[in-house]
Amino acid sequence: MSATKYTFDTVFADPSDPTGEGARARRRRTFSEAEVQQLCAQARAEGVSSGEVRAQEAIALATREASQAIKAALALIERERRRLMEENAQIALAVGTKLAHAALTEFPQAEVETALRAALHQAIDEPRVVLRASPEVAEKIAPRASEIAHEEGFEGRVQIAADAALTRADCRIEWRGGGAERASAAIETALQELIARNFRDGEDRGAGHGE
């Protein structure tokens, strides 16, 4: 006959006892009014807190998007403003050029005379200055060459030479130590380059501020 070994436990309650702690916990299915109110208040607080966090995140996102949209709109406005300014400058240049051409066609000798007077001051100590201009201009200025030289304080000789390759107010003025030239095409090109450079520099500065 074999012996049976007894085992011991620290809990002596009967699991099937309906009065045990586990059984009481399982049987409890109702809450008091105070507990219900407490649970509701806790749920509301958690809901409000979660809603506030989501609202703050939405506001931050909307703020960033609005800032980016404003920057893009300002950049577009600036580009459009500069485009209109450049167009206006080009239109003004075209109108001015057309008016200048008309004036120079009608009175080319006035512009050539102005260029000659300026050159005489640069060649003030030279013995001779030669003005080359279109035949029409040369014919009109030649009789006044000495008078112009005297008025500008030039004591040398002013020689007028007709050059069929020159038109309107284009002219070349030469002296021993240097010379000067007036060319309508070169002036127009310089103005076009000046306008383009100014607007290009302005765009570069605007891009630098935007970064």
Image: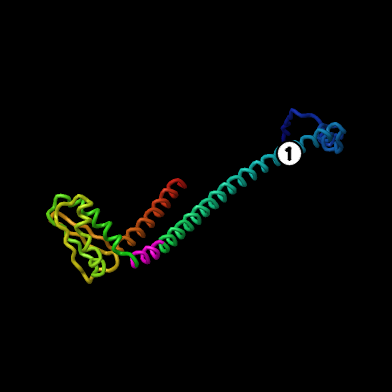
Q: Quadrant of residue 142?
A: bottom left
Q: Which residue is mark 1?
A: 48
Question: Of the residues shown, which amino acid type is indicated by label 1?
Answer: Val
Residue at 64% from the left image edge and 43% from the top image edge: 59
Rendered location of residue 123, percent (x, y): 17, 52
Quadrant in which the N terminus appears: top right
Rendered location of residue 28, percent (x, y): 85, 36
| Residue 210 shown in magenta | no
Q: Main secondary structure of the magenta part?
A: helix
For the view shown, which residue lies furthest in the top direction?
A: 10
Residue at 42% from the left image edge and 63% from the top image edge: 95
Q: Quadrant of residue 133?
A: bottom left
> Is 197 left or right of 85, judged from the image as shown?
left
Q: Magenta stretch?
A: 96-105
74 or 63: nearer the eye? 74
136 lies above or below 4: below
| Mark 1, secondary structure of its residue | helix
151 or 185: nearer the eye? 151
Rendered location of residue 155, percent (x, y): 15, 52
Local packing at callout 1 (Cα closer than 10 Å; few below 14, some 14-19, many 20+) is few
Q: Quadrant of residue 147?
A: bottom left
131 or 183: nearer the eye? 131
Rendered location of residue 49, percent (x, y): 70, 37
157 or 124: nearer the eye? 157
For the view shown, which residue lies furthest in the bottom direction?
A: 164
